Image (cartoon, rainbow, N blue to C red):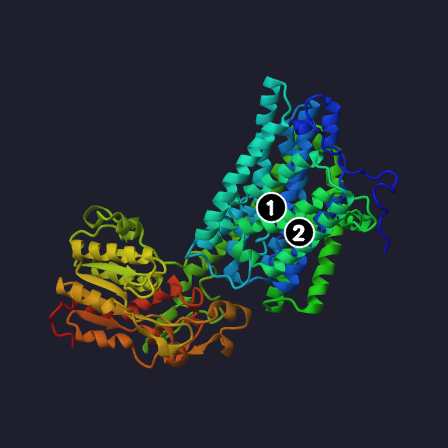
Amino acid sequence: MRFPPPADLAAGTSSPPSPVRSQPWADAGSSSAERVQRYSGFRPEVQGLRAVAVLLVVLYHVFMGRVSGGVDIFLFISAFFMTLSFVRKLEGGRPLALGRYWLHTFKRLLPLATVVILTTLFLVWWLYPAQDVADFRFQGVASILYVENWTLAFNAVDYYAADHSSASPFQHFWSLSVQGQVFLVWPLIFGLAWLVKRRTGRSSIPVLATCFGVVFAVSLVFSVITTHTQQSFAYFDTRARLWEFALGSLVALAIPYLRLSRALRVVLGWGGFVSMVLVGILVDVQGAFPGWIALWPLLSAAAIIVAGQSGSRIGFDRFLSWGPVVRLGDAAYALYLVHWPLLISYLVLRERTEAGPRSGVALVVLSVVLALLLTRWIETPLKRWAWPEARKWRMGLVIVVCMGLVTATAAGWAAVDRHREAQLEAQAERNNPGARVLDPGFEFTGDPNAPVLPQSMGDQWVGLPQECSGLYRSLNATAQGFCRQTPEVWDPDKVVAVVGNSHMEQYMGALIPVAEEENWQLISVLQPGCGFGVEGQSAACREGNEAALEYLKAMQPDVVITTSTRSELMSGEDEHVVTGLEQIVHELTADDITVVGFRDNPRLDFDPTRCAQERSPDDPLCSVSSDVVLGDHNPAEALETIPGFVGVDPTPLICPRGECVPVIGNVAVWLDSHHLTWDYTRSMAPLLHDTLVRAVQVTPGADTE
């Protein structure tokens, strides 16, 4: 292995950055050409740094299942290069041509991204579980439109988001989406500096330094606060990442004015590299970023960039400037694009949670080879393609075609799936009876080879159609925020309020058909993750439950239905009555409100539906005995001594004959590891009808036998 000679010994290599001048900003008395020269020249060590950063990303993903901080370095470097480019224009008096810049940038980025996204969509169709397809297809579109980070951010805080045991093959597009958004916004700051320079004739450097300094400070403060309060959202939030770009721009502005000794450059280069490698080992990047701790990898990268061309035989820049490393830096974009879908698709195909040493090495080698080929045969030729560059509309056409190919593919695929699902739904009454097969008198006459429904889990959360209004509107803003109702029923036989969390919400799949048949008015006040009690409640849950109880006492429904127990993960012995529910039952029944308590469904440590898709519905690994996940009796039976409380135990319909299985009556029972599908709970309605009708007829103080 031979490294290039030091910069001061190699003919034709870039010399170290210009030393700092004595006057502020080295501006006064400098010619325009001199100012431009400070921001000119190819920097092979920075291109090599891109190679090191992408290798860190790949190696940490494949072998450690962790995040390295390398992505943050990419964001930093992209702002560094963009700033150098625009400052050359500003200080050289050249037009910024922002429109052309935007078109050229996305015309350069989108073709390769389109190839990878379309290939990944094919892999999703071919390899991935059916329940993931709709969501990943949508993420493919979000990726080509540069909004994948927001898609992931809202999924990260959405309680009802699908529970994927495998990561999205498009997840890595979050950083490219943030980058694309900054590519749209950052030039506006340069445009402001251009206006100031045009009016005053002074250098744009102080203006840019002020603007980026403000962005850095405001965004960093925002990032620290939101990382502390809502880290899962902040991780993908563009606003919490702007300071990383601002730091890259500030370093680009400062570098021409720094004078460093050769020894210090060597120390900074090697120290920055060691620090950059250690961050992913010592810090939980995924769980801690992008708050102040993200300064670690960025300052490490800044140290390497500031070190620049040291001119020393032992400088780290010699390695970074080595031809093969620079060429890998040229392919960094392609390597970042391909490594993640390759890794995730391999894990899905092999049904593994991580790659082993041999498969990991093979994945890294394959990723590097594909990246080099894609760069050589797709990215580079398209960069050099002169036809689009001749006219702005041609570059715009390339962008539209790229985005159109992905969106049209996804839309056409979705349309085919919708048509197929509509055909399956039309036959569902006969082919997919669900819980109705548990009726002793049921006789199956459908197609035994019909597909299991639902095909997608995207619409399997139950919900009432409209916000509470009229007689049922709450004056309490907190309660009203959760309050939903069925269309108002004229002179209802019963007003039934459903209260609790998502485990009660899922049972509305069975309640809604019974309510429609029996002329009940249904209302729901449901908070995700907040049982109707005081057990382990957050401040928000306590506030919501207090508001819900206040609403119920004011509205005086005939019946309140909630979950009466809480099951624990794969531990039936811990199933217990919801803490605080007994007191609530006493308060409500004292107001002549009947309380119906549904026993909680089991909470598993795996997703039976995914297991059935990857193996088969009959595979023993996809089922579990109810004795393992629930107690041997319903703990809420103790509450039935309270006049006006009635218990309902749907366990025999979820775990028939003592076995919790993934599919019953050709319908998937489980939405995820601890929620039921709407399709299945709807099929429970005929079997629960008489039980529910009897329960709501009970009045407090009456004999419940």
Residue in the foreground of this view, choosing between 21 and 666? 21
Residue corresponding to mark 1: 176
Q: Residue at x 80, y 37 (%)?
A: 15
Q: Quadrant of the C terminus?
A: bottom left
Q: Are marks 1 and 2 in contact (CB under 8 Å)?
A: yes
Which quarter of the image is occupied by the N terminus? bottom right
Would you say 692 lies left or right of 28 here? left
In percent of width and height, residue 360 lies at 69, 65
78 relative to 136, above or below: above
Residue name at image x 86 percent, y 38 percent: 12
Camera-side residue of 436 and 190: 190
Residue drawn at (52%, 53%) of the image: 416
Whether 34 is drawn above or below 314: the answer is: above
The image shows residue 504 at horizontal and vertical percentages of 32, 63
Q: Residues within 10 Å of mark 1 (few under 14, many from 20)?
A: many
Q: Which of disc 2 and disc 1 is earlier in sequence?
A: 1
> Horizontally, is 54 left or right of 450 in the view?
right
Kindly identify which numbered label has been placed on residue 336. 2
As rendered, which of 371 and 533 lies closer to the eye?
Answer: 533
For the residue marked with disc 1, what is the amino acid?
A: Leu
Q: Residue 307, located in which quarter of the rendered image?
A: top right
Side (left or right) of 637 relative to 590: right
Residue at 74% from the left image edge and 60% from the top image edge:
365
Q: Secondary structure at mark 2?
A: helix
Q: Looking at the image, can residue 142 be seen? A: yes
The location of residue 537, given as percent across then percent down, is: 33, 62
How far apart, in angstroms, are the residues tagged by discs 1 and 2? 10 Å
Residue 424 picture quarter: bottom left
Q: Residue furthest left?
A: 701
